[in-house]
Image (spheres, helix red, strand yellow):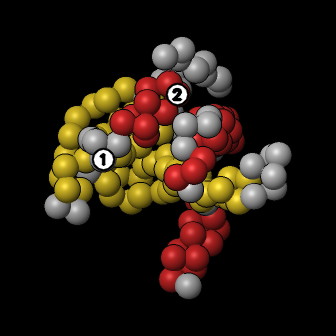
């Protein structure tokens, strides 16, 4: 209940949330993706972070990439963000691949909740972005 209340408040305060990711063929909810506003994360303040979580049986099928494209477009075009950030475990090669494909740049590693974490950023150079062919 607390998590849902926090997500609802994010939407009211910042116009963003974590959205359900639905498989168009089966209509199954296979996870979530979205933006989250952080007042403070790493050394940055007032930022938007891309995030996604999918059921393991749906990894590697392009769902995270497709959902993230729509979310990034929303963040850049509707929220007028100049930069969107992402974090991931340094050993999560699948997530790193998605971020690289979307054009995110690795910036640094930092300590997040006592765990080493990769920090990425994607700057808006225009209102659209292209997938990098990996």
Residue at (62% x, 37% y) in the render? 61
Say what secondary structure mark 1 lies in. loop
* Nearer to me, 96 or 9: 96
Task: Using the rendered image of the protein, determine whether residue 1 is visible from the camera's viewpoint.
Answer: yes
Instruction: Residue 99: name its quadrant.
Output: top left
Between the C-alphas of marks 2 and 1, the distance is: 17 Å
Point out residue 93 in the picture as x, y percentages from the top left corner: 36, 36
Which of the two labelled residues, at mark 2 and mark 1, occupies the earlier sequence position? 1
Q: Which mark is residue 89?
A: 1
Residue at (63% x, 41% y) in the render? 63
Total numbered circles: 2
Q: Residue furthest top?
A: 133
Say what secondary structure mark 2 lies in. helix
Which residue has dot 2 on it? 102
Instruction: Establish if 45 lies above or below 97.
Output: below
For the N terminus, the quadrant is bottom right
Point out residue 23 in the picture as x, y percentages from the top left corner: 75, 49
């Amino acid at each position: 209940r607390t998590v849902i209340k926090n997500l609802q408040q994010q939407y009211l305060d910042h116009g963003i949330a974590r959205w359900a990711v639905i498989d168009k063929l089966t209509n199954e909810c296979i996870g979530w993706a979205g933006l989250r506003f952080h007042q403070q994360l790493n050394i940055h303040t007032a930022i938007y972070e891309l995030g996604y979580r999918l059921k393991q049986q749906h990894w590697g099928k392009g769902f995270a990439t497709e959902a993230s494209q729509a979310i990034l477009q929303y963040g850049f075009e509707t929220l007028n963000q100049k930069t969107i950030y992402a974090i991931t475990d340094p050993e999560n090669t699948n997530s790193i691949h998605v971020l690289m494909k979307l054009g995110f740049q690795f910036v640094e590693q930092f300590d997040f909740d006592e765990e080493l974490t990769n920090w990425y950023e994607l700057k808006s150079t225009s209102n659209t972005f292209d997938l990098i062919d990996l």
